[in-house]
Protein backbone atom coordinates (compact mmCIF):
# COMPACT_ATOMS: atom_id res chain seq x y z
CA UNK A 1 0.00 0.00 0.00
CA UNK A 2 1.39 3.42 -1.03
CA UNK A 3 1.68 6.18 1.55
CA UNK A 4 1.11 8.95 -1.01
CA UNK A 5 -2.45 9.24 -2.16
CA UNK A 6 -3.45 10.45 -5.61
CA UNK A 7 -6.34 12.82 -4.88
CA UNK A 8 -9.07 12.48 -7.46
CA UNK A 9 -12.64 13.59 -6.77
CA UNK A 10 -15.57 11.25 -7.37
CA UNK A 11 -19.23 11.23 -6.39
CA UNK A 12 -18.24 9.78 -3.02
CA UNK A 13 -15.33 12.02 -2.03
CA UNK A 14 -16.64 15.50 -1.28
CA UNK A 15 -15.67 18.59 0.65
CA UNK A 16 -17.75 17.56 3.67
CA UNK A 17 -15.83 14.28 3.97
CA UNK A 18 -12.54 16.18 3.79
CA UNK A 19 -13.71 18.55 6.54
CA UNK A 20 -14.85 15.60 8.69
CA UNK A 21 -11.52 13.82 8.18
CA UNK A 22 -9.55 16.90 9.23
CA UNK A 23 -11.75 17.22 12.33
CA UNK A 24 -11.14 13.55 13.25
CA UNK A 25 -7.40 13.91 12.70
CA UNK A 26 -7.18 17.03 14.88
CA UNK A 27 -9.49 15.88 17.70
CA UNK A 28 -8.46 12.19 17.53
CA UNK A 29 -12.10 11.34 18.20
CA UNK A 30 -15.20 10.53 16.11
CA UNK A 31 -17.38 11.93 18.89
CA UNK A 32 -15.60 15.28 19.13
CA UNK A 33 -15.41 15.57 15.33
CA UNK A 34 -19.15 14.97 15.14
CA UNK A 35 -19.81 17.64 17.76
CA UNK A 36 -17.72 20.16 15.82
CA UNK A 37 -19.73 19.50 12.68
CA UNK A 38 -23.14 19.10 14.36
CA UNK A 39 -23.64 15.49 13.27
CA UNK A 40 -23.60 12.23 15.18
CA UNK A 41 -20.56 10.14 16.01
CA UNK A 42 -22.09 7.35 13.91
CA UNK A 43 -22.45 9.59 10.86
CA UNK A 44 -18.82 10.72 11.15
CA UNK A 45 -17.65 7.11 11.42
CA UNK A 46 -19.71 6.13 8.37
CA UNK A 47 -18.32 9.00 6.30
CA UNK A 48 -14.75 8.06 7.23
CA UNK A 49 -15.42 4.47 6.18
CA UNK A 50 -16.80 5.64 2.82
CA UNK A 51 -13.73 7.86 2.33
CA UNK A 52 -11.37 4.99 3.07
CA UNK A 53 -13.29 2.67 0.73
CA UNK A 54 -13.06 5.26 -2.05
CA UNK A 55 -9.28 5.70 -1.57
CA UNK A 56 -8.71 2.00 -1.12
CA UNK A 57 -6.64 2.36 2.04
CA UNK A 58 -6.95 2.88 5.79
CA UNK A 59 -6.53 6.45 6.97
CA UNK A 60 -7.36 5.99 10.65
CA UNK A 61 -6.11 3.40 13.11
CA UNK A 62 -9.22 2.56 15.14
CA UNK A 63 -7.52 -0.09 17.26
CA UNK A 64 -6.19 2.38 19.83
CA UNK A 65 -7.50 5.39 21.75
CA UNK A 66 -7.11 8.18 21.10
CA UNK A 67 -7.40 7.54 17.35
CA UNK A 68 -4.23 7.76 15.28
CA UNK A 69 -3.62 8.35 11.60
CA UNK A 70 -1.90 5.74 9.47
CA UNK A 71 1.01 6.81 7.27
CA UNK A 72 -1.46 7.13 4.42
CA UNK A 73 -3.73 9.20 6.68
CA UNK A 74 -0.89 11.58 7.56
CA UNK A 75 -0.22 12.17 3.85
CA UNK A 76 -3.91 12.64 3.14
CA UNK A 77 -4.23 15.13 6.01
CA UNK A 78 -1.59 17.39 4.50
CA UNK A 79 -3.22 17.24 1.06
CA UNK A 80 -6.73 17.61 2.49
CA UNK A 81 -5.81 20.86 4.26
CA UNK A 82 -4.29 22.17 1.03
CA UNK A 83 -7.46 21.25 -0.88
CA UNK A 84 -9.64 23.03 1.67
CA UNK A 85 -7.43 26.12 1.57
CA UNK A 86 -7.55 26.23 -2.22
CA UNK A 87 -11.31 25.78 -2.18
CA UNK A 88 -11.75 28.68 0.26
CA UNK A 89 -9.45 30.85 -1.84
CA UNK A 90 -11.45 29.94 -4.96
CA UNK A 91 -14.71 30.91 -3.26
CA UNK A 92 -13.29 34.26 -2.08
CA UNK A 93 -11.78 35.02 -5.52
CA UNK A 94 -15.04 34.13 -7.26
CA UNK A 95 -17.07 36.38 -4.97
CA UNK A 96 -14.58 39.23 -5.43
CA UNK A 97 -14.65 38.84 -9.21
CA UNK A 98 -18.45 38.78 -9.16
CA UNK A 99 -18.59 41.96 -7.10
CA UNK A 100 -15.92 43.70 -9.17
CA UNK A 101 -13.35 43.81 -6.36
CA UNK A 102 -10.80 41.70 -8.22
CA UNK A 103 -9.89 40.90 -11.80
CA UNK A 104 -8.42 42.90 -14.69
CA UNK A 105 -9.53 46.20 -16.21
CA UNK A 106 -7.95 47.02 -19.59
CA UNK A 107 -7.86 50.76 -20.29
CA UNK A 108 -6.76 52.31 -23.57
CA UNK A 109 -6.02 56.01 -23.96
CA UNK A 110 -5.13 58.33 -26.81
CA UNK A 111 -1.51 59.35 -27.25
CA UNK A 112 -0.56 62.25 -25.02
CA UNK A 113 -3.38 61.65 -22.55
CA UNK A 114 -0.92 60.15 -20.07
CA UNK A 115 -0.08 63.79 -19.20
CA UNK A 116 -3.68 64.48 -18.18
CA UNK A 117 -5.47 63.67 -14.93
CA UNK A 118 -5.95 60.07 -16.10
CA UNK A 119 -3.15 58.81 -13.84
CA UNK A 120 -4.92 60.35 -10.81
CA UNK A 121 -8.16 58.62 -11.78
CA UNK A 122 -6.41 55.26 -12.09
CA UNK A 123 -4.62 55.79 -8.78
CA UNK A 124 -7.89 56.54 -6.99
CA UNK A 125 -9.50 53.42 -8.46
CA UNK A 126 -6.50 51.31 -7.48
CA UNK A 127 -6.75 52.52 -3.87
CA UNK A 128 -10.42 51.50 -3.80
CA UNK A 129 -9.93 48.10 -5.49
CA UNK A 130 -6.36 46.96 -4.94
CA UNK A 131 -7.05 43.43 -6.23
CA UNK A 132 -8.00 44.73 -9.68
CA UNK A 133 -5.10 44.95 -12.12
CA UNK A 134 -5.47 48.02 -14.35
CA UNK A 135 -3.51 47.43 -17.55
CA UNK A 136 -2.93 50.53 -19.71
CA UNK A 137 -2.48 50.89 -23.48
CA UNK A 138 -1.32 54.08 -25.31
CA UNK A 139 -2.59 54.14 -28.89
CA UNK A 140 -3.96 56.41 -31.60
CA UNK A 141 -7.75 56.85 -31.74
CA UNK A 142 -8.36 54.46 -34.65
CA UNK A 143 -6.22 51.76 -32.99
CA UNK A 144 -8.13 52.21 -29.73
CA UNK A 145 -11.52 51.90 -31.36
CA UNK A 146 -10.45 48.86 -33.40
CA UNK A 147 -9.18 47.30 -30.17
CA UNK A 148 -12.48 48.01 -28.40
CA UNK A 149 -14.42 46.43 -31.25
CA UNK A 150 -12.17 43.34 -31.04
CA UNK A 151 -12.52 43.09 -27.22
CA UNK A 152 -8.87 44.00 -26.56
CA UNK A 153 -9.89 46.81 -24.15
CA UNK A 154 -12.70 47.24 -21.64
CA UNK A 155 -12.67 51.03 -21.72
CA UNK A 156 -11.00 53.67 -23.87
CA UNK A 157 -10.40 57.41 -23.43
CA UNK A 158 -10.29 58.87 -26.91
CA UNK A 159 -11.30 61.41 -29.51
CA UNK A 160 -14.12 59.48 -31.19
CA UNK A 161 -12.67 59.66 -34.70
CA UNK A 162 -14.92 56.89 -36.08
CA UNK A 163 -18.10 58.06 -34.28
CA UNK A 164 -18.35 54.75 -32.45
CA UNK A 165 -20.46 56.47 -29.78
CA UNK A 166 -23.35 56.69 -32.26
CA UNK A 167 -23.61 52.91 -32.52
CA UNK A 168 -26.19 51.18 -30.35
CA UNK A 169 -23.77 48.50 -29.09
CA UNK A 170 -21.50 51.04 -27.40
CA UNK A 171 -21.84 53.14 -24.29
CA UNK A 172 -20.19 56.55 -24.15
CA UNK A 173 -19.62 59.43 -21.78
CA UNK A 174 -18.09 62.84 -22.46
CA UNK A 175 -15.24 62.78 -19.95
CA UNK A 176 -13.45 66.05 -20.65
CA UNK A 177 -13.61 68.99 -23.07
CA UNK A 178 -9.98 69.95 -23.57
CA UNK A 179 -8.90 73.41 -24.84
CA UNK A 180 -6.42 73.57 -27.70
CA UNK A 181 -3.09 75.38 -27.47
CA UNK A 182 -0.55 76.54 -30.01
CA UNK A 183 2.94 75.08 -29.66
CA UNK A 184 5.55 77.62 -30.75
CA UNK A 185 9.31 77.98 -30.50
CA UNK A 186 10.56 80.80 -28.29
CA UNK A 187 11.61 83.17 -31.07
CA UNK A 188 8.35 82.89 -33.05
CA UNK A 189 6.59 86.28 -33.48
CA UNK A 190 3.42 84.95 -31.78
CA UNK A 191 5.23 83.38 -28.81
CA UNK A 192 4.59 86.30 -26.45
CA UNK A 193 0.85 86.48 -27.13
CA UNK A 194 -1.76 85.60 -24.46
CA UNK A 195 -3.96 83.91 -27.05
CA UNK A 196 -3.95 83.20 -30.78
CA UNK A 197 -6.70 83.04 -33.40
CA UNK A 198 -6.50 80.35 -36.06
CA UNK A 199 -7.02 83.00 -38.75
CA UNK A 200 -3.56 84.37 -37.88
CA UNK A 201 -1.80 81.24 -39.15
CA UNK A 202 -1.76 82.02 -42.85
CA UNK A 203 1.59 81.14 -44.46
CA UNK A 204 2.77 79.29 -41.33
CA UNK A 205 4.47 75.89 -41.54
CA UNK A 206 1.89 73.77 -39.75
CA UNK A 207 2.91 70.45 -38.21
CA UNK A 208 -0.44 68.70 -37.95
CA UNK A 209 -1.10 66.34 -35.06
CA UNK A 210 -3.89 63.92 -35.85
CA UNK A 211 -5.82 61.91 -33.26
CA UNK A 212 -5.56 58.84 -35.52
CA UNK A 213 -2.74 57.08 -37.30
CA UNK A 214 -4.79 56.86 -40.52
CA UNK A 215 -5.31 60.18 -42.37
CA UNK A 216 -8.81 61.26 -43.39
CA UNK A 217 -10.79 60.24 -40.31
CA UNK A 218 -13.75 62.17 -38.94
CA UNK A 219 -11.36 63.67 -36.39
CA UNK A 220 -9.12 64.98 -39.16
CA UNK A 221 -12.10 66.43 -41.03
CA UNK A 222 -13.25 68.21 -37.86
CA UNK A 223 -9.91 69.85 -37.19
CA UNK A 224 -9.17 70.69 -40.83
CA UNK A 225 -12.60 72.27 -41.05
CA UNK A 226 -11.56 74.65 -38.25
CA UNK A 227 -8.67 75.80 -40.44
CA UNK A 228 -10.94 76.26 -43.47
CA UNK A 229 -13.54 78.23 -41.49
CA UNK A 230 -10.73 80.54 -40.41
CA UNK A 231 -9.67 81.00 -44.05
CA UNK A 232 -6.51 78.89 -43.72
CA UNK A 233 -5.91 76.39 -46.53
CA UNK A 234 -2.20 75.70 -46.00
CA UNK A 235 -1.19 72.10 -46.62
CA UNK A 236 0.38 70.74 -43.42
CA UNK A 237 4.15 70.50 -43.51
CA UNK A 238 3.98 67.17 -41.69
CA UNK A 239 1.22 64.83 -40.48
CA UNK A 240 1.61 62.55 -37.44
CA UNK A 241 -0.28 61.10 -34.45
CA UNK A 242 2.85 61.20 -32.25
CA UNK A 243 2.80 64.40 -30.22
CA UNK A 244 6.38 63.85 -29.01
CA UNK A 245 7.55 64.08 -32.61
CA UNK A 246 5.47 67.23 -33.03
CA UNK A 247 7.16 68.86 -30.05
CA UNK A 248 10.59 67.84 -31.34
CA UNK A 249 9.92 69.46 -34.72
CA UNK A 250 8.51 72.64 -33.20
CA UNK A 251 11.43 72.89 -30.78
CA UNK A 252 13.82 72.66 -33.73
CA UNK A 253 11.93 75.64 -35.26
CA UNK A 254 10.63 73.77 -38.32
CA UNK A 255 7.06 74.85 -37.78
CA UNK A 256 4.22 75.33 -35.30
CA UNK A 257 1.40 73.04 -34.18
CA UNK A 258 -1.98 73.02 -32.46
CA UNK A 259 -2.30 70.47 -29.67
CA UNK A 260 -4.85 69.55 -26.99
CA UNK A 261 -3.57 71.01 -23.74
CA UNK A 262 -3.47 67.60 -22.01
CA UNK A 263 -0.28 67.02 -24.03
CA UNK A 264 1.38 69.98 -22.32
CA UNK A 265 -0.15 70.18 -18.82
CA UNK A 266 2.68 68.33 -17.10
CA UNK A 267 5.43 69.43 -19.45
CA UNK A 268 7.88 71.46 -17.37
CA UNK A 269 11.05 73.18 -18.58
CA UNK A 270 10.24 72.47 -22.22
CA UNK A 271 13.30 73.34 -24.30
CA UNK A 272 12.60 76.16 -26.79
CA UNK A 273 8.83 75.67 -26.54
CA UNK A 274 5.99 78.07 -25.68
CA UNK A 275 2.30 77.07 -25.41
CA UNK A 276 -0.34 79.72 -26.07
CA UNK A 277 -4.13 79.12 -25.74
CA UNK A 278 -6.19 79.14 -28.92
CA UNK A 279 -8.96 81.72 -29.13
CA UNK A 280 -12.30 81.19 -30.88
CA UNK A 281 -15.26 78.87 -31.28
CA UNK A 282 -14.57 75.16 -31.55
CA UNK A 283 -11.01 75.33 -30.25
CA UNK A 284 -11.29 72.21 -28.14
CA UNK A 285 -11.05 68.44 -28.28
CA UNK A 286 -13.58 66.17 -26.61
CA UNK A 287 -12.24 63.14 -24.74
CA UNK A 288 -14.95 60.50 -24.69
CA UNK A 289 -15.17 57.24 -22.74
CA UNK A 290 -16.25 54.31 -24.87
CA UNK A 291 -17.10 50.75 -23.86
CA UNK A 292 -19.21 47.87 -25.08
CA UNK A 293 -22.62 47.71 -23.43
CA UNK A 294 -22.41 43.89 -23.54
CA UNK A 295 -19.18 43.85 -21.48
CA UNK A 296 -20.04 42.11 -18.19
CA UNK A 297 -16.70 42.83 -16.49
CA UNK A 298 -17.70 43.96 -12.99
CA UNK A 299 -14.45 45.95 -12.73
CA UNK A 300 -15.67 48.06 -15.67
CA UNK A 301 -18.97 48.69 -13.86
CA UNK A 302 -17.06 49.82 -10.76
CA UNK A 303 -14.88 52.19 -12.78
CA UNK A 304 -17.85 53.74 -14.59
CA UNK A 305 -19.69 54.13 -11.29
CA UNK A 306 -16.73 56.00 -9.81
CA UNK A 307 -16.34 58.22 -12.88
CA UNK A 308 -20.03 59.18 -12.94
CA UNK A 309 -19.92 60.10 -9.25
CA UNK A 310 -16.84 62.25 -9.84
CA UNK A 311 -18.52 64.10 -12.73
CA UNK A 312 -21.59 64.81 -10.58
CA UNK A 313 -19.39 66.21 -7.79
CA UNK A 314 -17.30 68.46 -10.05
Image (tube, rainbow, N blue to C red):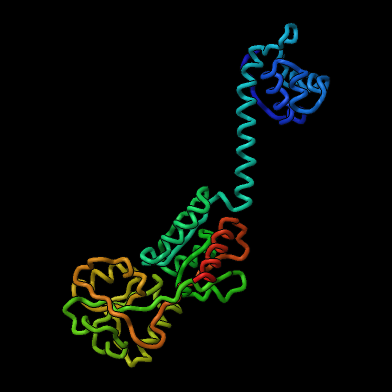
Asked whether residue 150 appears in the rendered view, the answer is: no
Quarter containing the N terminus:
top right
Residue shown at the point (71%, 12%) measured from the top left: 67
Please state the horizontal and vertical placement of residue 314, each as a whole percent of the image: 49, 71
297 with respect to 120 (left or right): right
Q: Given the current orientation, which residue lies at the most extreme front position?
A: 313
Figure check: 87 above or below 45: below
Q: Nearer the viewer, residue 4 or 124?
A: 124
Residue shown at the point (48%, 60%) measured from the top left: 107
Report the number of numbered marks. 0
130 with respect to 1 (left or right): left
Q: Nearer the viewer, residue 101 or 162?
A: 101
The answer to which image quadrant residue 79 occupies is top right
Please state the horizontal and vertical placement of residue 288, each as a whole percent of the image: 49, 72
Asked whether residue 245 appears in the rendered view, the answer is: yes
Q: Given the current orientation, which residue lies at the most extreme top position?
A: 64
Q: Given the current orientation, which residue lies at the most extreme bottom position?
A: 231
Q: Nearer the viewer, residue 3 or 43?
A: 43
Please state the horizontal and vertical placement of residue 76, each as a whole percent of the image: 64, 20
Figure check: 67 above or below 262: above
Please state the horizontal and vertical placement of residue 39, each as a whole percent of the image: 81, 26
Residue shown at the point (47%, 57%) measured from the top left: 124
Residue shown at the point (51%, 74%) measured from the top left: 174
Amino acid sequence: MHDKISLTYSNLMNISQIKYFIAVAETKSFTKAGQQNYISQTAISQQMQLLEDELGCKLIDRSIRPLKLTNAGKTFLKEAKAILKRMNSAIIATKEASSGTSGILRIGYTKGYERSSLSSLILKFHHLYQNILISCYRKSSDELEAGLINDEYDLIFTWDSTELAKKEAYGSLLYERVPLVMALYNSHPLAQRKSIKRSELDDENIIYMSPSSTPGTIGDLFFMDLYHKAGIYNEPLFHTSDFESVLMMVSSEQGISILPDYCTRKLNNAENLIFVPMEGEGEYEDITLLYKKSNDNEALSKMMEMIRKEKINR
